[in-house]
C-alpha cells in the first residue's frame, strides 16, 4: 500500500494548526464582540443595498444623453452598493473603536474585515476591464483568495500545502500551486493582450498618417507577441524546461511539411499582403466572379463583402498567386465605358454632345473629369460609339451607375429624336402566284389532289 508523502502531511498539519488557532481566537470575549460587530455591519450594508438599489436604478433609467461607457460605470457601481457600504461602515467602526479604546486587539478583526472587503471591492472593479467572462472570473477569484489568505495570515501555510500536492512527469514536477499560478498568469496576460490590441486598434483607426494595412499588421504583431508571452510564462509557471521544445519544434516542422502547407502558405501570404499594402480594408477588388470591398484582413483569409450582402472568405494565397483587380489601390478614381449605337440618319456630332451631357447629369459621375464620347466604327445597322466617364466611389457599385447613365441616354435620345437601330428581317415570297389546291387541273389533264403520306414515302424511296 502506497504511503502519503511526508511533505504533504507536514504542510497540511501546519495549515490545520494555523486555522485551528485562528478559530480558537474567535471565542475570546473581545473577538466575539468584533465578530458580532462585523455581522451587524454586513446586515446594515445589505439593508442599504436593498433600499438604495431600486432608487439608483430608477435614477439611471431616467438619464438621457449619457455616454454608454459612463452608464456602464454607473451600473457596475450599483451592483456593488453592499460591498462599498460595508467598506465605509467598517472603516468608520474602526475609527470609533480606536477613539474609545487604546488596545489594538479591540479592533483586530474589524480591521481585517475592512481591509479584505476593501481589497475585494477594488479587485471587482479593476477586473471589469476584462471582457471575457471566464478570464475575468479566474482573475477575480484568484485575487480574492490571495488577499484573504494574505491578510488573515494563512498565505504561507496554504502555499506550502498546495506546492506539496503534485505529480512528477519525467524531470518536471507539476503542482497544484504551479497550475493555479499558470492559470492566473495566462489569464492576466491574455486579458492584457486583448486590452492592448483594442487600444492600438482604436488609436490606429484615428491616425490618418498610417495606412489600414500597416495598422492591421501592427495589431497582428502585438497579438503574436502578447499571446506567445502568455504561453511562455504559463509554461514557466508550471515548471517546464522550455529548452526541450526543440524536439517539439522539429516535430511541428515535419507536420508542416506533410499536412499544413496550405495553412502556412496562407499565413505567409497574409503577412506579405500586409507588408506590401497591395490591398487594405475598404479597397474594392475583383477576383474571378467576385466583386466587392474588403471588410477585414485575417491571418488565413480576406473577407470580401459583395453588393448583395454575401461575405466571401478568400484565402490569402489566392490573392498572392492569382490576378486581382484593385479598383481603389492607388486612387479611388475609376473610369467606366458604355457602348451604344445610333441610326445612320442621326448626326454623329450631335450624338456625341448629347451623350456627354447625359452622363454629366448623373450625380455620381465626376464633373472634374469631363465625360467624353467617341465614334468607334460603322456597324452593319448603326454608328457605334463609346461613352467614357469617371466615378470616385466604386464601393457604391458599378452596375447601378451604368444603369443610371443608360437611362439618362434614353431620355436624352427620346428628347432629341435620335433612334437606336435594331436588327430587322424581311421575308420575300419568290413565287406569289403558285396555284391553290382548288385552282384547277394539272398540265396532264387530271384533277389535282394533295399528296398523301404514303405518296410522299414512296417518292422519298424512289429518290434514294
Image (cartoon, rainbow, N blue to C red):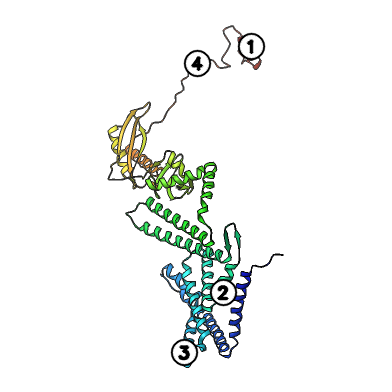
Which of the labelled discs sits on residue 98, or is there none? Answer: 3
Disc 4 target residue: 433
Label 1 or label 3, whichever lies nearer to me, is 3
Disc 1 target residue: 461
- Which of pointers 4 and 3 lies earlier in the amino acid sequence? 3
Question: Alpha carbon of mark 4 to alpha carbon of mark 3: how far?
Answer: 133 Å
Q: Residues within 10 Å of mark 1 (few under 14, many from 20)?
A: few
Residue at position x 41%, y 44% in the image: 285
- Which of pointers 4 and 2 lies earlier in the amino acid sequence? 2
In this view, the residue farthest toward the front is: 6
Q: Residues within 10 Å of mark 4 (few under 14, many from 20)?
A: few
- In what quadrant of the picture does the N terminus appear? bottom right
Please say whether residue 106 is visible from this viewpoint. yes
Which of the labelled discs sits on residue 73, or is there none? Answer: none
x and y percentages locating residue 183 in the rendered image: 53, 63
Label 2 or label 1, whichever lies nearer to me, is 2
- Which of pointers 1 and 4 lies earlier in the amino acid sequence? 4
Amino acid at each position: 500500500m502506497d504511503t502519503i508523502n511526508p511533505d504533504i502531511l507536514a504542510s497540511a498539519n501546519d495549515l490545520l494548526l494555523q486555522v485551528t488557532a485562528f478559530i480558537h481566537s474567535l471565542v475570546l470575549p473581545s473577538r466575539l464582540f468584533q465578530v458580532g460587530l462585523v455581522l451587524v455591519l454586513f446586515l446594515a450594508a445589505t439593508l442599504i443595498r436593498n433600499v438604495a438599489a431600486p432608487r439608483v436604478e430608477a435614477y439611471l433609467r431616467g438619464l438621457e444623453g449619457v455616454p454608454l461607457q459612463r452608464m456602464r460605470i454607473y451600473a457596475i457601481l450599483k451592483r456593488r452598493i453592499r460591498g462599498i457600504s460595508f467598506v465605509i461602515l467598517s472603516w468608520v467602526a474602526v475609527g470609533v473603536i480606536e477613539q474609545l479604546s487604546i488596545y489594538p486587539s479591540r479592533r483586530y478583526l474589524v480591521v481585517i474585515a475592512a481591509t479584505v472587503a476593501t481589497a475585494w471591492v477594488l479587485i471587482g472593479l479593476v477586473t471589469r476591464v476584462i471582457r471575457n467572462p471566464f478570464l475575468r472570473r479566474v482573475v477575480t477569484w484568484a485575487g480574492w483568495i490571495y488577499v484573504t489568505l494574505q491578510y488573515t495570515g494563512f498565505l504561507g501555510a496554504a502555499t506550502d500545502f498546495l506546492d506539496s500536492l503534485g505529480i512528477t512527469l519525467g524531470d518536471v514536477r507539476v503542482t497544484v500551486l504551479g497550475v493555479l499560478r499558470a492559470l492566473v498568469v495566462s489569464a492576466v496576460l491574455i486579458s492584457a493582450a486583448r486590452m492592448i490590441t483594442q487600444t492600438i486598434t482604436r488609436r490606429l483607426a484615428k491616425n490618418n498618417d498610417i495606412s489600414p494595412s500597416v495598422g492591421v499588421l501592427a495589431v497582428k504583431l502585438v497579438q503574436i507577441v502578447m499571446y506567445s508571452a502568455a504561453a511562455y510564462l504559463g509554461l514557466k509557471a508550471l515548471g517546464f524546461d522550455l529548452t526541450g521544445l526543440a524536439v517539439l519544434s522539429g516535430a511541428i516542422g515535419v507536420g508542416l511539411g506533410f499536412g499544413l502547407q496550405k495553412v502556412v502558405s496562407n499565413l505567409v501570404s497574409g503577412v506579405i499582403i500586409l507588408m506590401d499594402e497591395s490591398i487594405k480594408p475598404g479597397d474594392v477588388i475583383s477576383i474571378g466572379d467576385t466583386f466587392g470591398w474588403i471588410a477585414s484582413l485575417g491571418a488565413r483569409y480576406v473577407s470580401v463583402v459583395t453588393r448583395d450582402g454575401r461575405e466571401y472568405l478568400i484565402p490569402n494565397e489566392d490573392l498572392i498567386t492569382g490576378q486581382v483587380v484593385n479598383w481603389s489601390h492607388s486612387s479611388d478614381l475609376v473610369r467606366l465605358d458604355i457602348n451604344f449605337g445610333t441610326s445612320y440618319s442621326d448626326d454623329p456630332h450631335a450624338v456625341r454632345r448629347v451623350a456627354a451631357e447625359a452622363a454629366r447629369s448623373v450625380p455620381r459621375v465626376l464633373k472634374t473629369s469631363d465625360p467624353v464620347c467617341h465614334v468607334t466604327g460603322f456597324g452593319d445597322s448603326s454608328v457605334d460609339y463609346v461613352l467614357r466617364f469617371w466615378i470616385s466611389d466604386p464601393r457604391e457599385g458599378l452596375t447601378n451607375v451604368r444603369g443610371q447613365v443608360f437611362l439618362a441616354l434614353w431620355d436624352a435620345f427620346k428628347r432629341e429624336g435620335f433612334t437606336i437601330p435594331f436588327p430587322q428581317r424581311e421575308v420575300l415570297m419568290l413565287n406569289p402566284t403558285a396555284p391553290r389546291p382548288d385552282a384547277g387541273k394539272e398540265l396532264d389533264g387530271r384533277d389535282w389532289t394533295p399528296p398523301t403520306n404514303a405518296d410522299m414515302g414512296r417518292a422519298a424511296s424512289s429518290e434514294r
